[in-house]
Image (cartoon, grey):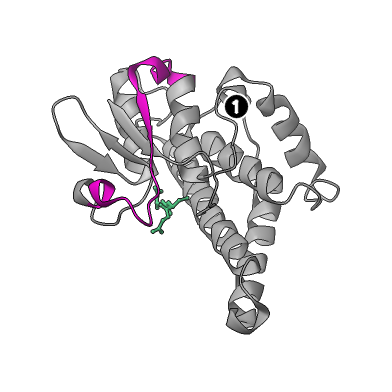
Amino acid sequence: MRLWYTPTSPFARKVRIAAAELGVAEQIRLREADPWTDKHLRMLNPLAKVPTLELDNGDVLFESAVICDYLDMLCQKRCLFPADGPGRWKSLLTQGLADGAMTAAGRLFADEKKPADQRSEAMMVRFHKARDAALDWLEREPLRQTPLIGEVAAAAFLGYLDFRWKDRDWRTKRPKLSGWFAGFEARPSMASTRHAILKSPVD
Ligand SMILES: N[C@@H](CCC(=O)N[C@@H](CS)C(=O)NCC(=O)O)C(=O)O
């Protein structure tokens, strides 16, 4: 399998954390791409986004939730996506929340780099609110150290905040979440997937 990714993408990191947790990371070759310019990526994925996964039979999967579900299926006993019951909806909902929060955070990062006269202050306020309310929501959730997909996505979101805004404190008012993340960050899946800076950051 080949994963098209950028080292700055929280969605690509989410897939990589999932792969490491599932023990399938070694089956995946990484292919770095600039989603804004890579024509080959656009041929594989009409949205030209990372992560995009090419399977060995030529099939292509995109959307991190779909890719993680596929990788989980390789694990056979559904390690990250509970097959049914309330645990399934809780995990999917936490994943959805974290994915939305990563989108808001990515848009905030992109907007903060723009000259003031090219930003929409109203949109930035909205993204800030989404990011902060998502953190508050996660603070109220009982998160597990042995992850399901919700925890994988939440870890990718928090890791992205720390990567882009090292000095911005989300922890003080959220002691449960920060305690959970401190434990989670020690997992090998987090250590082996750290973000890195590209020459021209895109997300
Ligand atoms: N919903 C998608 C989001 C993926 C996404 O937004 N990827 C960003 C990088 S973090 C990207 O490729 N951006 C380039 C673009 O929007 O054209 C997923 O879950 O995979």
Please state if 31 lies on the left or on the right of 39 as rendered.
Answer: right
Q: Residue furthest bottom?
A: 117
- Residue 141 seen from this side: no
Dot 1: element: helix
Residue beneath the point at 76% across and 46% down: 166
Instruction: Let me know if residue 174 is in the magenta part.
Output: no
Query: Which of 63/177 is in front?
Result: 63
The answer to whether residue 25 is above or below residue 182 is above
Q: Position of residue 157 (x, y in %)?
A: 59, 45
Q: Mark 1 = which residue?
A: 190
Query: Which of 1/75 is in front?
Result: 1
Residue 65: quarter of image: top left
* Magenta region: 21-42
Residue beneath the point at 53% across and 52% down: 200
- Across the whole image, how many numbered discs are drawn on residues? 1
Residue 85: quarter of image: top left
Residue beneath the point at 29% across and 20% down: 74
Q: Give, as a three-letter code, the residue at label 1.
A: Met
Q: Position of residue 3 (x, y in %)?
A: 34, 33
Q: Quadrant of the N terminus?
A: top left
Please state if 68 lies on the left or on the right of 146 as rendered.
Answer: left
Query: Which of 18/134 is in front?
Result: 18
The answer to whether residue 186 is above or below residue 87 is above
Instruction: Let me know if residue 32 is in the magenta part.
Output: yes
- Residue 86 seen from this side: yes
Q: Residue furthest front?
A: 199
Q: Position of residue 116 (x, y in %)?
A: 67, 79
Query: Which of 194/72 is in front?
Result: 194
Residue beneath the point at 61% across and 71% down: 114
